[in-house]
Amino acid sequence: MAVQMHMETAEGLKIPSLGFGTWQCTDEDELEAALNAALETGYRHVDTAYFFGNEHVVGRVINEWIESERLAREDVFLSTKLPIFGFHEDLVEEYMLKSLENLGVERVDLYFAHFPLHMNYDEGLDDPTFMETDHMAVWKKMEEQVEQGRATAIGLSNFNMTQTERIVEEAAIKPACLQVENHIYLQQRDLVQFCHDNGIVVIGFSPLGSPDVNSFYESIGRPTRDLPDLFQDPTVLSLAEKYGKTAAQILLRFQLQRDVAVVVKSKTPSRIEENFEVFDFCIGDEDMEELRALDVGEAARIVDFSVLSQKLLEQPEWPWHTFTKVSE
Ligand SMILES: NC(=O)c1ccc[n+]([C@@H]2O[C@H](COP(=O)([O-])OP(=O)(O)OC[C@H]3O[C@@H](n4cnc5c(N)ncnc54)[C@H](OP(=O)(O)O)[C@@H]3O)[C@@H](O)[C@H]2O)c1
């Protein structure tokens, strides 16, 4: 089965199916080198977020490529996100403009709502405040960003099925994409199917299981957690041997073959190349079934936003109540 280099939304927006992620890339020199390596390798989809604190570096590198005519603006698909502390109708425009300024571009290809509720932690993570969340009011402001030409398309991130359905039903401009954690252990098949039925491209984040996520928890003073190691999964290892590929390549290819686009992060040049070499082989149907059978569900969720504040769990729009029960 050949996988497409691009995935297409109902409105005909083409999204490169393998994107370069930039979360936890806060060392400017390191990110600059990694993004240069990624663009040289052929990545044409770059994922950042206001929350990642690195839009200025991402924008600088992309603009250097454009100015030196190694890249045309329309050849790179650039996404960023409205942060959790900007998730309110009165704040959308302000944060959109901040992101454009940080990135040094007039328009992003995709502007995501990063998380389906508002939390401000200007006074520190131990003392956050919350504003009431009206999803449709925020989405209307997101739509205005498209109308103003600041974003080609808008999308959702970390929204659950009910929340996504509501936006799809009521929006004037439908979400182009849903970016959610997605990998062999957390396949979210119903949500993926719903998106596919509605012409929404699903972009799976942490496709390798975000093996360095504990360093993020530590960086904000939170305890580390025991997390599944996707690279050690016996099925993945045996398929890697069978196809003469690495575990990472099996994990990425699995997603692409189920029509889930991926954003994958690495600061290591050899891995940046390795992760891009997934278009030259095909996982057979029976092996795809074996990988599908590895799905664990919510208990395998790795990126836990409640580490920011346990008070998130009390918010009506906290998206993962099943997950909450599992981790209690
Ligand atoms: N919307 C959201 O809320 C959200 C949340 C999380 C992530 N994301 C996006 O999704 C992107 C990817 O997710 P992620 O960064 O959490 O995790 P990931 O891409 O699953 O994993 C990244 C980690 O895997 C390592 N790695 C990369 N390629 C490898 C390979 N071939 N072999 C062995 N190890 C490898 C990297 O190490 P080195 O860097 O040391 O090479 C890094 O520690 C993010 O960067 C971000 O853009 C979005």
Image: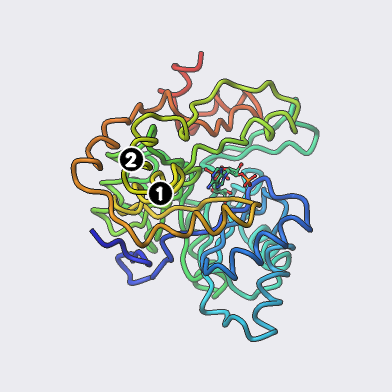
Query: Is any atom of residue 99 visible in this view?
Result: yes
Can you say which quadrant of the picture contains the N terminus? Answer: bottom left
- Expressed as whole percent of the image width and height from the top left, the position of residue 133 reads 54, 40
- Expressed as whole percent of the image width and height from the top left, the position of residue 309 reads 65, 27
Q: Is residue 218 left or right of residue 6?
A: right
Three-letter code for the amino acid on which mark 2 is drawn:
Leu
Query: Which one is in front, 94 or 324?
Result: 324
Three-letter code for the amino acid on which mark 1 is drawn:
Lys
- Expressed as whole percent of the image width and height from the top left, the position of residue 143 reads 48, 63
Q: Is residue 194 left or right of residue 252?
A: left
Above or below for 236 versus 29: above
Residue at coordinates 33% horizontally, 48% vertically from top-left? 243
Q: Name which quarter of the figure residue 261 lies in.
A: bottom left
CB of residue at label 2: within 8 Å of ligand 1?
no
CB of residue at label 1: within 8 Å of ligand 1?
no
SS for dot 1: loop
What label sits on residue 239 in the rendered view?
A: 2
Query: Is any atom of residue 141 visible in this view?
Result: no
Rounded to the nearest angstrom, the CA distance separating label 1 from label 2 is: 8 Å
Q: Look at the numbered discs 1 and 2 and tell me whether their residues touch, using CB distance below 8 Å.
A: yes
Above or below for 328 versus 271: above
Within-10-Å neighbours for mark 1: few <14, some 14–19, many 20+: some
Write down the residue under mark 1. Answer: 245
SS for dot 2: helix
Query: Which one is in front, 170 or 160?
Result: 160
Residue at coordinates 49% horizontally, 71% vertically from top-left? 152
Which corner quadrant of the figure contains ligand 1? top right
Q: Earlier in the sequence, mark 1 or mark 2?
A: 2
Residue at coordinates 78% horizontally, 56% vertically from top-left? 28
> Which residue is most to the bottom?
69
